[in-house]
Amino acid sequence: MDLSNNFKNPVLINFNLVFAIVMILIMGFLTSGNYANAMDAYNYYAVSFLIFGMMQGAMTATNCFMERDIKKPNLRILSSPCGKFPIYFSKMLASFLFDYILHLLVAVILLIAGINLGGQNVGWIFLMMIPVEFSSAALGVLFCCIFHCEETASTILSLFVSVIAFLGGAFFSLDGLGSTLAAISRISPVKMLIDVFFAVIYDNNLSGVLPVLFISTAFSALCIFGCQKTFRAEDYL
């Protein structure tokens, strides 16, 4: 039910699908003159905005968990004897599946358009997307459990994601703006993901795949643990 509700939301679909593709085309066009090969600009923003979209999946989770129109029909779950875990985990899972399906569709469209996503290594890109997408959904649900309000959780998450995306080079790389900004950029998980994705795509270097899988999975587990400690059914009413 949660998954179908997400697919009935045109705002979420447009943001995760249409907006991502449009931004890749716009930013690729605007910065193509900065690259020896104009296609490299589109390749860069295809990866950076795909990662940015995965981070923004946290907002999908806040909508799925506490948005008013979805919240009311799901109140019956609270009276079931299933306990707390299935309530919040089902929202994580629905948000994850929704975002992953749409971002896979974005990736397929980009591949058809001639964007380089690793050739024979594209499967590793799709694999790394799975725990990253889920960790974003888990973070969104955790923030709802902590703040008990979709608007507050979404506002804080939106600011947080925008900051780490900017620092990580999702909009433009900070590496050429001095050693200080380059060093600050490295603290962003977005920067780590961009570097690992490009290593797989251009260098056939898979050494970063396992750390991404492990760190994302561990972060998801921490978020689930946090939800178990902070979720209260009465806050959902």
Image: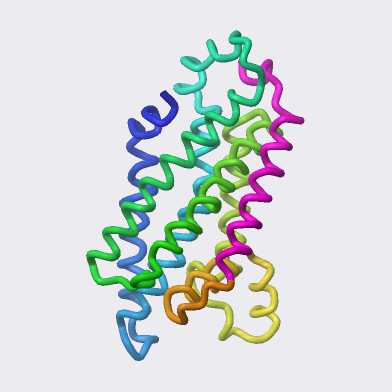
Q: Quadrant of the C terminus?
A: top right
Instruction: Judge left or right: residue 35 versus residue 108.
Output: right
Instruction: Judge left or right: residue 18 versus residue 88.
Output: left
Q: Picture coordinates of residue 158 (x, y %)?
A: 56, 49
Q: Nearer the viewer, residue 208 or 45?
A: 208
Magenta stretch, main secondary structure, is helix
Above or below, 169 against 35 in this view is above
Q: Picture coordinates of residue 95 (x, y %)?
A: 48, 38
Above or below, 2 against 54 in this view is above
Q: Quadrant of residue 120?
A: bottom left
Give the residue at x 35% y 91%: 36
Q: Picture coordinates of residue 153 (x, y %)?
A: 62, 38
Give the residue at x 64% y 57%: 214
Q: Quadrant of residue 179?
A: bottom right
Q: Nearer the viewer, residue 146 or 101?
A: 101
Q: How many discs appear?
A: 0
Q: Residue most toward the bottom? A: 36
Magenta span covers which residues? 208-237
Snapshot colouring = rainbow
Above or below, 16 against 201 in this view is above
Give the residue at x 63% y 64%: 211
Give the residue at x 51% y 21%: 71
Q: Quadrant of the N terminus?
A: top left
Q: Picture coordinates of residue 222 (x, y %)?
A: 71, 44
Q: Residue most toward the right? A: 229
Q: Per the image, is 165 magenta?
A: no
